[in-house]
Image (tube, grey):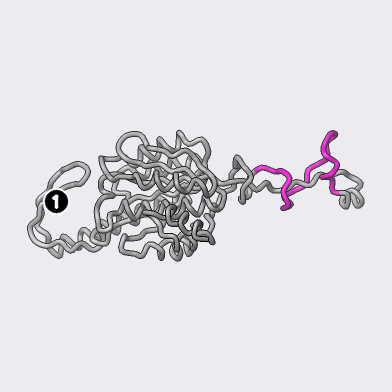
Amino acid sequence: MPQIADRKSQIANPLLDPGFLSRLERLSLVSRRLYAGQMKGERRSTRRGASVEFADYRNYVAGDDLRHVDWNTFARLERLFLKLFVEEEDLTVHLLLDTSRSMAFGEPAKIAYAQRVAAALGYIGLVGYDRVTAALLGEGAPRVLPAVRGRPQVFRLFQFLGGARAEGRADLGRALRDYALAAGRAGLAVVVSDFLNPDYQAGLRALAARKFDVTVIHILDRTEVEPDLVGDLRLVDSETGETREISVSQYLLGQYRKGLAEFCDDLNATCARYGMDSVRTTTDVPFDQLVLRTLRTTGVVR
């Protein structure tokens, strides 16, 4: 038992603690689509094979295995039918993490919160025998961890996610399009980002076109939602370096809140248009509450 505890401690450090990992093991990821997987797992597949769950009948064809003939139906109709069953195979889970410089903002930084979200969902997938892949969407081409499967791969996934750094100016729309086109197999895609990019819609549209089942996790810092700025300030864009001098007044704060609400509404409308789930959170929300309560309520996990 001490050896198992030590092993879990190594898995958990530094993203997730052992107690939280134990709670995650009771959960599973939910996909609204059926995908044909590559290996036997715990998911319904679009293919038909020989499992224990009945799916349909088809006419007998010479050469078919007589063991699959429904003899009860033959006794009633004097016709041969074969029973078809649902194959249970693995789901591919795509963890897509925004690593643009704006994700470095806040305390804790949005990137740190996003890493923990991705690590938790990846752990749930690996424990549930899903195939899990991850991509860091920053400046340049996405950095991708090839799909891994099984609990022993948790170390590799956590190491990859732990190496994420929020730096550079990313084109989230292009990064998502590139990923959607290059991905060998569609599946459940979880996009974790602040979405402070003017072209993110094109990226989500590309994922929808490739038949991904997409969940958007929108992360903001509390001060981005309720800024406490006052007086004459010089603001610097974290990604472009552009500066702007402003005088913060109650009227300006009101306009900012209005613009933020419209921005969030646009993201929600885009997700609704393409049949995607959308969850918005701030980094002051306890992490375990987001995963164990909010994501369960919205149906991302169960």
Q: Position of residue 18 (x, y in %)?
A: 44, 60
The quadrant in which residue 143 appears is: top left
79, above or below 257, in the image: above
- Indicate whether residue 179 is drawn in magenta: no
- 19 sits left or right of 140 in the view: right
Going 43% across and 39% down the picture, which residue do you hit? 145
Q: Position of residue 254 (x, y in %)?
A: 20, 63
Going 91% across and 52% down the picture, which residue do you hit? 76
Label 1, residues with CA under 10 Å away: few <14, some 14-19, many ≥20: few
How many tags in the picture?
1
278 or 43: nearer the eye? Answer: 43
Going 25% across and 56% down the picture, which residue do you hit? 106
Name the residue beneath numbered marker 1.
Answer: 235
Q: Amino acid at mark 1?
A: Leu
Q: Quick one: which residue is furthest to the front in this view? A: 2
Asked whether the viewer can see residue 299, the reply is no
Q: Residues in magenta?
A: 47-70
Judged from the image, the secondary structure of the residue bearing numbered disc 1 is strand
Q: Position of residue 194 (x, y in %)?
A: 32, 51
164, above or below 258, in the image: above
The quadrant in which residue 40 appears is: top right
- Indicate whether residue 48 is drawn in magenta: yes
- 86 sits left or right of 153 in the view: right
The quadrant in which residue 228 appears is: bottom left
